């Protein structure tokens, strides 16, 4: 079998230079850190860690020593922070080509252009370019190309426009995007900022793909340029992406005569050589005449391999696993995550499939020691990284309450910390009530090397509240009557929760009767029927009415009252021309000052008080204008006629009633 290495495979000059500068600092005996992983390659990062080079994710983690800025570069704010810190020595390993793109972005920003950047939003190079645009650039990802017209319509792109690219993007996609944008904005200025090394690497790989039966692309799964290289090669021939020689499987090469090999820009030379050596000396040629299913299952294992096996035997201390090889794989109890009090037999049974990580190979007795928990932990970390990157919600059990917050069991031996301020949207004095409960939350900070995970349930609750708000607003229809809960009372009205969002009931809409303060008729937590008066989605504003959700009391006046009826009521207001009397909630009548007494009244307050219960006669009902005229004096009994009786002595000495006895109180009021 022939193995061909593509030209321009492996480290690009920018990555090679960054590694060289870093090792120069290490050789000088300095305490060296890199701001973010120097390259997206685990083997290189592990090598640097062995040289005591730290990888930091946040500036706050660095207080002294030498920091290397990786080839992807950083934004101006980060650069200024590092350069202004006297305790930090900065080694800028930004790729010269990336620096050139940063200068172009800054130049066009000064010119007042609308800047479009084609690239992966989460990639550190794109994040740095976004910073050089003062966070004003519009980032367009490869997945956005098809709907680019709809995306651009949402933005104000009046004036000049320039389109640039992340240096490792696929050139064809970049020009496809440029063509689509030019159809909408003919004045678009296009600057091809894709690195020439990237372009050459892709071109040479494509040339080789057309000449071979199988293609191997070497590079870390997290490497953006390696992933694009794999995608390109897959469009032409069968392709596998591997991180190193240990990923190669013998069955890939059945019937294969020629194999092409290329590598991403973050793949070191030693990894490429290791793959080539295994390909050339590993006796990978398939001999069909000797082929059997049993031999197809045979494989040479190495430490770090991931295998899938079937449980054969479960003992107290270990599990025997069939991994499709003549060698036995032993899974010790200590390499399995078990709940407190659980045993291996509680978790596994013969016949179960299980994924394992090879830890140790004992060639003397052909036994392989494997681990389930280390692989579980690694995969769980990757799930957490993916959740952080995509903003996904995760779940975990509240394990412990500590003074500053809550410890969450994330599974696979990983624990996360949730600060007290991020547990809920409201203040909660005691978190012990949550012990043992399952929480849904977002990951807001993650550091694999420091085993640090910061969680927020508050973010999840806020997201859910916002979702419910939008759904509620979308479903609310004006003039409908719904049920709500009183949340807050103010001088000007009441706020009522109608399903995740509060609407305002103005004080004038609280009741048909006159209300001095909403607390006079409502209580917080009370359920009420409300009528939707107005919905303004863009302002999240909802106007409600409680009184309009109830029958208009004036509609019952004709049924309950008639002219000449004597009625009882309560004085609600006293004015100079009379007094308003509430007959039923929401229905008031007016007693004019002239209808208060048979004598002259200067002001209604002389004989009436607010809140006083009185009797009055209905003089008139005007339903159209909602007016009822009342009379107090006509509701009183008529004065007795004494003209037919013998005049009495004034002093009443003979025990008879005098005029003073009958009308004395009236005379006293008139004084």
Image (cartoon, helix red, strand yellow):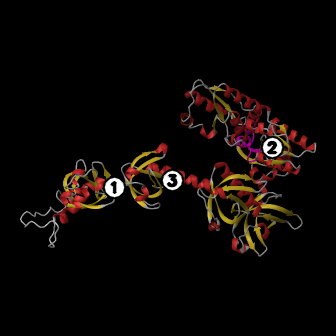
500 to the left or right of 218: left
Residue ID for mark 3: 468
Mark 1: few, some, or many residues within 10 Å (few <14, many ≥20)?
A: some
Q: Horizontal and vertical percent for residue 579?
A: 28, 53
618 to the left or right of 92: left
Q: Nearer the viewer, mark 1 or mark 2?
A: 1
Residue ID for mark 2: 38
Mark 3 and mark 1: Cα distance apart in space: 34 Å
Q: Secondary structure at mark 3?
A: helix
Res. 257 in view: no
Q: Secondary structure at mark 1?
A: loop
Q: Nearer the viewer, mark 2 or mark 3?
A: 3
Q: Looking at the rendered structure, which numbered label has been put on residue 513?
A: 1
Q: Horizontal and vertical percent for residue 632?
A: 22, 57
Res. 139 in view: yes
Q: Is residue 653 above or below residue 463?
A: below
Q: Nearer the viewer, mark 3 or mark 1?
A: 1
Mark 2 and mark 3: Cα distance apart in space: 43 Å
Q: Quadrant where the C terminus lies?
A: bottom left
Q: Horizontal and vertical percent for residue 166?
A: 70, 35
Q: Tags 1 and 2 in contact by the CB under 8 Å rule?
A: no
Q: Residue at x 54, y 53 (%)?
A: 465
- From this viewpoint, which residue is outermost toward the left? 644
Mark 1 and mark 2: Cα distance apart in space: 73 Å
Which tag, 2 or 3, sits closer to the chain's start? 2
Nearer to me, 404 or 656: 656
Asked if the magenta segment contains residue 208, the reply would be yes
Magenta segment boundaries in residue numbering: 206-228
Mark 3: few, some, or many residues within 10 Å (few <14, many ≥20)?
A: some
Q: Looking at the rendered structure, which numbered label has been put on residue 176?
A: none
Nearer to me, 414 or 193: 414
Mark 2: few, some, or many residues within 10 Å (few <14, many ≥20)?
A: many
């Amino acid at each position: 079998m022939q193995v061909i290495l593509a030209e321009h495979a492996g480290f690009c000059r920018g990555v090679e230079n960054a590694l060289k500068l870093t090792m120069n600092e290490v050789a000088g005996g300095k305490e060296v850190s890199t701001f973010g992983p120097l390259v997206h390659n685990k083997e290189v990062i592990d090598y640097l860690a062995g040289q005591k080079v730290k990888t930091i994710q946040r500036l706050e983690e660095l207080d002294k020593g030498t920091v290397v800025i990786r080839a992807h570069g950083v934004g101006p704010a980060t650069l200024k922070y590092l350069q202004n810190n006297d305790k930090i020595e900065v080694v800028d390993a930004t790729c010269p080509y990336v620096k050139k793109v940063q200068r172009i972005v800054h130049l066009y920003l000064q010119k007042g252009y609308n800047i479009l950047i084609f690239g992966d939003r989460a990639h550190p190079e794109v994040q740095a370019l976004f910073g050089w645009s003062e966070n004003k650039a519009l980032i367009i990802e490869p997945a956005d190309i098809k709907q680019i017209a709809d995306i651009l319509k949402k933005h104000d792109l009046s004036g000049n426009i320039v389109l640039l690219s992340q240096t490792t993007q696929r050139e064809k996609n970049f020009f496809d995007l440029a063509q689509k944008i030019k159809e909408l904005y003919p004045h678009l200025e296009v600057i091809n900022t894709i690195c020439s090394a990237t372009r050459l690497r892709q071109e040479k790989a494509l040339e080789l793909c057309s000449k071979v039966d199988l293609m191997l692309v070497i590079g870390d799964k997290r490497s953006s340029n390696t992933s694009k290289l794999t995608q390109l090669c897959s469009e032409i021939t069968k392709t596998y992406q591997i991180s190193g020689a240990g990923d190669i499987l013998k069955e890939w090469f059945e019937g294969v005569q020629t194999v092409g090999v290329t590598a991403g820009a973050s793949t070191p030379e030693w990894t490429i050589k290791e793959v080539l050596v295994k390909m050339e000396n590993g006796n990978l040629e398939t001999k069909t005449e000797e082929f059997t299913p049993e031999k197809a299952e045979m494989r040479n294992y190495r430490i770090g391999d991931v295998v899938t096996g079937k449980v054969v035997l479960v003992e107290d201390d270990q599990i025997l696993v069939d991994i499709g090889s003549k060698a036995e794989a032993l899974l010790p109890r200590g390499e399995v995550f078990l709940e407190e009090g659980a045993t291996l037999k509680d978790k596994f049974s013969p016949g179960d499939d299980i994924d394992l990580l090879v830890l140790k190979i004992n060639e003397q007795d052909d036994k392989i020691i494997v681990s389930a928990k280390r692989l579980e932990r690694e995969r769980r970390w990757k799930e957490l990284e993916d959740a952080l990157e995509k903003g996904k919600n995760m779940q975990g059990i509240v394990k412990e309450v500590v003074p500053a917050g809550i410890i969450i069991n994330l599974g696979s031996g990983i624990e996360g910390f949730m600060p007290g301020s991020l547990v809920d949207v409201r203040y909660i004095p005691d978190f012990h009530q949550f012990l043992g409960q399952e929480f849904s939350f977002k990951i807001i900070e993650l550091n694999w090397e420091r085993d640090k995970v910061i969680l927020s349930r508050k973010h999840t609750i806020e997201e859910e509240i916002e979702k419910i708000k939008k759904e509620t607003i979308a479903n609310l229809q004006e003039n409908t009557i719904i049920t709500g809960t009183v949340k807050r009372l103010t001088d000007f009205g009441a706020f009522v929760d109608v399903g995740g969002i509060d609407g305002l009931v103005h004080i004038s809409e609280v009741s048909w009767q006159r209300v001095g303060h909403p607390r006079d008729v409502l209580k917080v937590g009370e359920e009420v029927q409300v009528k939707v008066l107005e919905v303004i989605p863009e302002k999240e504003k909802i106007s409600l009415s409680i009184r309009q959700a109830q029958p208009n009391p004036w509609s019952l006046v004709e049924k309950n009252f008639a002219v000449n009826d004597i009625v009882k009521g309560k004085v609600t207001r006293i004015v100079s021309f009379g007094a308003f009397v509430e007959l039923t909630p929401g229905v008031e009548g007016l007693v004019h000052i002239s209808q208060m007494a048979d004598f002259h009244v200067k002001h209604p307050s002389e004989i009436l008080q607010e809140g006083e219960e009185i009797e009055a006669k209905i003089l008139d009902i005007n339903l159209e204008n909602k007016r009822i005229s009342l009379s107090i004096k006509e509701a009183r009994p008529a004065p007795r006629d004494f003209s037919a009786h013998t005049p009495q002595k004034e002093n009443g000495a003979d025990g008879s009633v005098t005029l003073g006895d009958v009308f004395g109180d009236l005379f006293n009021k008139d004084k």
